[in-house]
Amino acid sequence: MDRLINTSLHSCTSIEAQAVRTLTTGHDMGEPYASSQTSSRGARALTERVFAIRGRTGSAGVALLGALWCPVPAAALDFGPFVLNGFIKNEFVYKTRQCPSCQVEIGESKQKAWADALASGAPYETRTVQTVLFQPWLGANFDLGQGVRLSGLLSQRRRDGDSDIPGFFYERNVAVSHEKYGRLAIGAMPTRSWAVADYPYGSNVGQAEPWSSSGAGYGLLTKAVRYTSRPFDVAEGDLVLEMTLDRGDTGFRVNKPRLVELYGQYVKGDLVVDTILQHARNGTPSAWGHGPFTGLTPFPADDALLRSSSQAIVMVMARYQIDARWEASGGIRHNRWSGANAVMTAPATATTGAQWNSMFNVDWNGVRDGMTDPGYAARSLDLMAGVRYRMGPWTWSAGVTHLGKASTANPSERGQRNTATIGSLGLNHDFGNGLQAYLLAGAVRYGRLGLSPMSMPDNAAFSGVDSRAHRSGQSMGLGVVYTF
């Protein structure tokens, strides 16, 4: 697998902002693993610090949820109302059965039939893969009085020196919040389906990437409006509700993109339950839960050539702090895709190849309702579980993600009969002052040789082991993370 400890940093910019913002955005490789989820004792200590400033920031309920959600960065830099924090990470992973250039059509999506073939006799080798990640967050908070706060956040990630997802910000938004009426944010921001699945669930047990970056959800929003309620007292616990809307690429006038995400978090003692429903229409058809929500293709000029498509997820995750050392967590996700017909949007020229849309689950050379190369609807179920044990500065973890078979009427095999089980073991040491180091080990096992499960964005995603060539692979490695 690509990473075992895929850690996370919340976009909280100060302890006061943590208390007010209640629900904040997670990221898949920032906060040091050992401190990305506080123990019961640690949560109580941080809660007491938040309570100390609640007279300026809001109710005890807000402060409690802020403490549970937002670990404090080791050494954030304050400049008046501005706060700069972030992380840098360097990781080396030793992986078996790697061949990144063995697909005949290198770089083509697994949804295209001509991308299915592998080069004959290609060598699959054990390789060491290095990944360097850097992401800063620049936040600003202005107290306007009478319980009203104005805030802004800007963040972008660099992977091996380049933009992680070129052309898309992780955070570029402004928000206004009130201790009684909640919080309203506008701009670019991650979805909850990716951010919460990534942190704390996936990152706490080494499953951040296979769990949060798979499935039918979207991960990054560009033109979002998000409302987060204040906490409500429900059944002796705290319930926060949230709705997010995004209109994607407004250049599409026929197949207009629309995304709706509903999110709820319930906290009662040491139990936390997160529920997410996301429905998207006319985004880029995909099974990449980290992907940005835009339009059917990158080019609005294709609008009239295409038909509408949709996809959605329902996800429930829970974690329970058994005691100060042990924490158990798990999740279940239902994916649904409408499918998308394959359409050539521009013919080949003397200098360029033919251009196609982003199709999904296509019966290549088939015909349905007069349409050639039709896309078919599909549904699947994915599972995740893990456990952590903390002992002083040391944290042990074990996790597993299972991507299940899909149900579809497509007469062609496009990965619906395959499964993937991805397991991980981890050991992390916290040196203090923002510096942590970790060891990792992992393995992947496919149900059969062939195209990868429908929930995976690529045939070699997450582990580098191509499901068309090998049914299993292993990895081990080490890394260092510094947060400021």
Image (cartoon, rainbow, N blue to C red):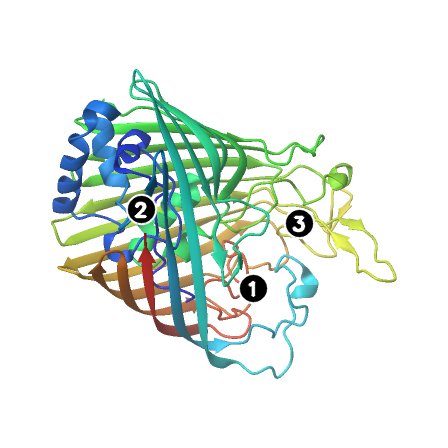
Lower position in the chain sequence, tag 1 or tag 2: 2
Mark toward the viewer: 3 or 1:
3
Above/below status of 222 relative to 324? above
Instruction: Determine the secondary structure under disc 1.
Output: loop
Amino acid type, callout 1:
Leu
The circle drawn on residue 451 is 1
Amino acid type, callout 2:
Ala
Lower position in the chain sequence, tag 3 or tag 1: 3
Is residue 126 found left or right of 249 in the rendered image?
A: left
Asked whether the beta carbons under mark 3 and mark 2 sit within 8 Å of each other, the answer is no
In front of the other: 361 or 172? 172
Image quadrant assignment for residue 364:
bottom right
Is residue 410 found left or right of 46 in the rendered image?
A: right
In front of the other: 321 or 431? 431
Residue 305 lies, in percent from the top left, at 77, 40
Residue 157 lies, in percent from the top left, at 47, 52
Instruction: Determine the secondary structure under disc 2.
Output: loop
Is residue 350 found left or right of 251 in the rendered image?
A: right
Task: Specify few, some or many for label 1: CA neighbours under 10 Å numbering under 14, 14-19, or 20 or more.
Answer: many
Residue 384 lies, in percent from the top left, at 34, 53
Is residue 176 found left or right of 19 in the rendered image?
A: right
The circle drawn on residue 358 is 3
Lower position in the chain sequence, tag 3 or tag 2: 2
The circle drawn on residue 76 is 2
Q: Which residue appears at 30% of the width and 29% of the height?
A: 20
Q: Which residue appears at 73% of the width and 53% of the height?
A: 366
Image quadrant assignment for residue 441:
bottom left
Q: CA distance from mark 3 to mark 1?
A: 17 Å
Q: Which residue appears at 64% of the width and 58% of the height?
A: 412
Instruction: Determine the secondary structure under disc 3.
Output: loop
Above/below status of 362 relative to 63? below
Image quadrant assignment for residue 118:
bottom right
